Amino acid sequence: MWSEDSAIEGALLIKSILLYGTRPSDIHIICDDAAEKLLRTRFTLVQRPAHRIRVWFYKPSWQSMLDRVEREGTIKTDHSAGLPGLMKLFIHEILPPTVKKAIYIDTDAFFIADPAMLWDTFDALKSKTAIVMPSHPDLDSPEWHHASKICSCVMLLDLEKLRLLRLMDSSIYRQQNLLPTALSPDTFKAKYGLPGGDGHGRYDNVRLGDQGYWWAIVDLRPDIFEPLSYDFEVTSCILDMYQAGLGNELITEQEELSHQLHIKDTPQEGQAVFPKLLHFNCLHDTTIYMNWSGWSDPSNSLTIRWGAALSYHTGFKWIWLNKGRRDRPEQSLEMFTISDVVFADQLSVKKRRPHNHHIPKPH
């Protein structure tokens, strides 16, 4: 989350995790000072959550992010998410080695079901799988090198595997001749050619920001990839939420499936989408999706299907999340700040010693 606006969106996502979660949760947020400040005003209202909640704020400096991209040497972005958006490719380097798996979710989304159901997807994966995200093989977008066939908006990442595979390259790795060599350079070249056209510049033909690079990785390395159920990516962008939405409470599963779109010729074919995570992206002319002008139009299709859900979750008060018992101190919300994040490639200079991330006392 890199701005107060993104934190406003992300706060609703985290509220939904606390609202529906049935287990203790660790929440890792890569952010700037403005985002942390706003989020803390919300989190301090929750003194007795139903389960233990721990929140870490990781705050790499802007210069450190620029430097990490420079050490990689080939990537750039023309996406509105800018430099912070590229950090999705480096989550395994920002979070410490003690965090072995993680779920990444864009800020413009929120749960309407237990997040543990998404986490449990890890239990069903193949032994080599390191990346899980929605797959849309039916979409055709040659202008984006078909990068719309995936969405990096929701990702299950086996961080331990990505570290062993050395996902992203670095001048430090190249100077040290470390093995294995980084995974991504060969996939980028296979998909987009030489960086800069001659091998001496940066990729200026990659679209959709980090997603374009993830697309090269998973398309060329299907052995480490599995698709995610659309239940966890009910998106307003291109796919129009699959036409799923609130409505007839007595509809049958077969009827529901017959009404849904963008299911044929996908991993979801033959299975109705049962929404668990709503993603309101591509709502243009607003920096905060909750402020989209379409929500005030009662005839808008998206508003008809999901406007009531948005109103309920935005209006749900943070203090109502104090569902824990007063005599159970373990039912608490703790917050920690990790300032001046050091990327893992720099730590490798120190013979790949563990991250110097201590857990400070809660603020």
Image (cartoon, helix red, strand yellow):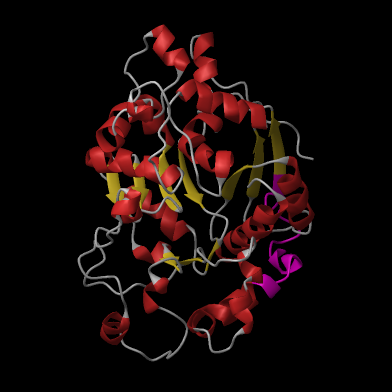
Residue 148 location, x and y as percent? 35, 55
**In the image, is residue 20 above or below residue 73?**
below
Q: Is residue 330 in the magenta section?
A: yes
Can residue 192 be seen from the camera position used here? yes
Q: Quadrant of the C terminus?
A: top right
- Quarter-of-image position of residue 317: bottom right
User: As drawn, is 272 to the left or to the right of 115?
Assistant: left
Residue 257 location, x and y as percent? 28, 80
Residue 194 location, x and y as percent? 31, 28
Residue at position x 52%, y 84% from top? 300
**In the image, is residue 66 above or below residue 211?**
above
Q: How many marks?
A: 0
Q: Is residue 339 in the magenta section?
A: no
Front-most of 11 and 302?
302
Residue at position x 71%, y 61% from top? 325
- Quarter-of-image position of residue 315: bottom right
Residue at position x 32%, y 78% from top? 260
Can residue 128 be seen from the camera position used here? no
Residue at position x 67%, y 53% from top? 7
Q: Main secondary structure of the magenta part?
A: loop
Highlighted range, magenta:
314-334
- Quarter-of-image position of residue 355: top right
User: As drawn, is 116 to the left or to the right of 36?
Assistant: left
Residue 162 location, x and y as percent? 38, 32
Front-most of 247 and 263?
263
User: As drawn, is 355 to the left or to the right of 140?
Assistant: right
**In the image, is residue 254 above or below residue 96?**
below
